[in-house]
Image: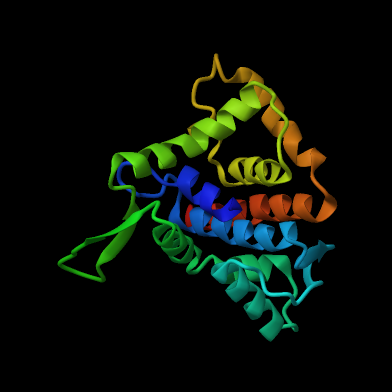
Amino acid sequence: MLADEFYLIAHEDRTGRTRLHPRATGLGLAASLIGELILTDRVRVFEGDLYVVSREPPRDALAHNVLDLLLAQPQHRELRTWMTFLAQDATVRVGERLLRAGLLEPVTKRKLIGSDETHYVPMNSVQRNAAAWAPVRLANILVHRHQMSITDRVLAGLVVATGLTRYVLWDVSSHRPGLNQLYGVVDTLPDDLRQLVEHTDSVVGSVLAAGRR
C-alpha cells in the first residue's frame, strides 16, 4: 500500500531510523494515508479541502480507522489540518501495520531519561531485502521509464515533496534519466492527488523552516 511503500523508503533498512526529520516523515505518511483513501474512492480533495464521498469501510483496518476519523469530524475539512493531525502518530500506526504484515519487528531502545524509543526494524534477510527493495524498485521504474501505476506516481510525488529524492535516485550519473522523469510525474496526477502532493510539499517546507528559526 502507498503508506507502506513510503515508510520503507523513509526509514533505514538496517536500523529502522527515519532518513528525514521525524515531523517530515510523519507528514509524508499522513499524506500517504489520505492518498490511500483517495485512491480507493473514499475521499476527494477540492480546493484544499477534504470531502468524504463514500462511507463504505475500506478492507484495511488502518484505512478504515482514518476514514472513521474523517466521518466523526465533518466540520474539519482543510487538508493541511488533517495532515498535521494524522502526522502525530502516522509513523507508529504504519509501522504497526507493517509489523502485522510480517515485514518489520519492534525493537525498543531503553533510555535513562525520558520515554523509551521503539523502532520498527527488518530483522531477517527476507525483511531486509523487502525494505531495501522499496527505493530500488521505484528508481528502476523511473530510470527505465516503465509505465507507472497511479499509486507509484503518488509515491514519487511524495518522495520529492518530503525530500527523499536522494535516497531513491542516489547515483547522479546513472540515475539522471530518473531525475528527469521524476519531476514531471506530479503533472500527470489527477487534480486531487496533485493537490495532496503540493500541500505536502508546502506543509513540510513550513515545518522545517519553523524548526530552523
Judge by depth and name the residue closer to the eye, 55 or 82: 55
Q: Is residue 56 above or below residue 93?
A: below
Q: Among all residues in the image, which is located at the extreme left? A: 112
Residue 31, compared with residue 145, is above or below; it is below
* Vertical placement of residue 17 versus 183, above or below: below
Total residue callouts: 0
Looking at the image, the residue that sits furthest to the top is 173
What residue is at 72 percent from the left and 55 percent from the top? 196
Is residue 54 visible in the rendered image? The answer is yes
**Is 13 displayed left or right of 70 in the figure?**
left
Rendered position, 147 above or below 209:
above
Q: Is residue 125 left or right of residue 59?
A: left
Residue 61, horizontal then vertical, whole percent: 55, 71
Q: Residue at x 70, y 81 (%)?
A: 71
The percent coordinates of residue 72 (x first, y second) are: 67, 85
- Is residue 1 shown left or right of residue 128? right
Which sits in the foreground, 54 or 167? 54
129 on left or right of 169: left
Snapshot quadrant of residue 52: bottom right
At x 58% / y 34%, what residue is drawn? 138
Q: How is the image coloured?
A: rainbow
The percent coordinates of residue 76 (x first, y second) are 72, 79
> Would residue 13 be seen by someone viewing this image from the given angle?
no
Residue 12, how many percent across, how many down?
38, 43
Q: Nearer the viewer, residue 121 or 82?
A: 121
